[in-house]
């Protein structure tokens, strides 16, 4: 018997259209899984646990903590084959990489969702959920961590990024096909850990990074230009943050490629690295923020997660 536990959290996959014409997450977990479960044979069983009905843009670290905690509770049952998490696409890559950091079981955790609502005549949610359950039950998915299954694609959580606002193939990866996973970390609460993202752009001064420090940021992710470069004034703010003991991770606004420090000058990637800023490798800002928050909350060095 293949036992799949489905954790539902809301998102477009659970949305219907209100009389005002806006999408709201209204569909229960049981109603979501019922037509999909019917496609499987008698050697499959499904346990549905509804955690929330959120638009994932409203997801907080407290919500992520709840998902991580429930996943670990589910895996205390040795009869479970795998877990599927339905989630909104806006922040799916963030929750998925957080789960992967703490995922210490060989059985798979699969994230999926939809770009079209439950009541859309061409809803993609049922197909995505069916394929996610198939992968969760497949022995080949064991031992490789957390995955995103969406639009017929199977993508590792590490490096996953939402690349299109409406296309049914919503996600892509900026990482390798089989990314190296660090040793799992014992689950810790992320709620209460503040990591801010500061964008770089031509002419950017230090206002935003100073504001993040003043607001109590425990870590800062700088979304730099190119391979990891910023202007002089922003660079001075980064150095002051580092001198104050605040870890800084430098990522890039460029869609593809790794971050690397090869330029000198006040805001060059090589200069920032020499001052103690950590390059994000292939991770973009959203996932870099989560990884830095996990490092801060758990007390591990950020470099071990990147």
Image (spheres, rainbow, N blue to C red):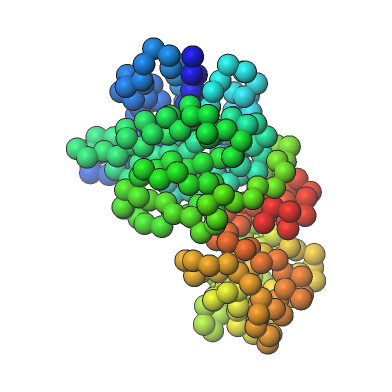
Query: Which quadrant of the view contains residue 288?
Result: bottom right
Q: Relative to residue 280, is residue 93 depicted above or below?
A: above
Task: Place residue 74 in its image quadrant.
Answer: top right
Residue at coordinates 48% horizontally, 18% vertically from top-left? 2
Relative placement, left or right, of 116 versus 99 is left
Residue positioned 72% across, 73% down in the render = 273
Please provide percent x and percent y for residue 295. Answer: 72, 51
Name the spot of residue 1 as percent of width and height, x first: 49, 14
In the picture as drawn, the residue positioned furthest to the front comes out as 140
Above or below: residue 23 compared with residue 79: below
Image: 66 above or below 182: above
Q: Is residue 105 visible?
A: yes
Number of numbered callouts drawn? 0
- Residue 26: x, y in percent? 34, 31
Residue, x 49% and y 70% (percent of image)?
Answer: 254
Question: For the view shown, which residue lies furthest in the left direction?
Answer: 121
Provide residue 299's location: percent of width, then percent of height. 79, 49
Left or right: residue 21 versus residue 64 is left
Residue 186 falls in image quadrant: top right
Please indicate, yes or no, whether residue 222 appears anywhere in the rendered image.
no
Extreme residue toward the bottom, this view: 265
Q: Residue at x 44, y 54 (%)?
A: 172
Quadrant into which the C terminus falls: bottom right
Q: Nearer the viewer, residue 72 or 10?
A: 72
């Amino acid at each position: 018997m293949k036992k799949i536990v489905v954790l539902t959290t809301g998102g477009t996959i659970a949305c219907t259209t209100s009389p005002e014409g806006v999408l709201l997450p209204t569909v229960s977990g049981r109603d979501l899984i019922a037509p999909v479960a019917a496609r499987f044979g008698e050697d499959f069983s499904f346990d549905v646990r509804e955690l929330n009905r959120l638009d994932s843009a409203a997801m907080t670290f407290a919500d992520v903590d709840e998902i991580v905690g429930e996943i670990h509770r589910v895996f205390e049952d040795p009869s479970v084959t795998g877990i599927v998490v339905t989630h909104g696409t806006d922040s799916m890559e963030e929750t998925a990489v957080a789960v992967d950091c703490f995922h210490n079981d060989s059985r798979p955790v699969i994230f999926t969702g939809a770009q079209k609502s439950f009541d859309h005549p061409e809803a993609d949610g049922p197909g995505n959920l069916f394929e996610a359950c198939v992968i969760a039950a497949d022995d080949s998915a064991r031992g490789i961590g957390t995955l995103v299954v969406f639009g017929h694609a199977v993508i590792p959580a590490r490096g996953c990024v939402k690349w299109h606002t409406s296309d049914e193939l919503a996600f892509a990866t900026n990482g390798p096909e089989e990314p190296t996973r660090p040793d799992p970390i014992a689950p810790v609460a992320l709620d209460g850990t503040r990591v801010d993202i500061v964008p770089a752009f031509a002419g950017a001064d230090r206002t935003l990074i100073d504001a993040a420090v003043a607001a109590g940021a425990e870590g800062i992710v700088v979304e730099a230009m190119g391979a990891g470069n910023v202007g002089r004034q922003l660079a001075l703010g980064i150095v002051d943050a580092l001198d104050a003991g605040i870890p800084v991770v430098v990522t890039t606004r460029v869609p593809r490629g790794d971050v690397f420090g090869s330029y000198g000058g006040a805001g060059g990637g090589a200069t920032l690295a020499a001052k103690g800023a950590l390059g994000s490798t292939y991770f973009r800002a959203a996932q870099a923020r989560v990884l830095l928050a996990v490092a801060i909350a758990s007390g591990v060095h950020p470099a071990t997660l990147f």
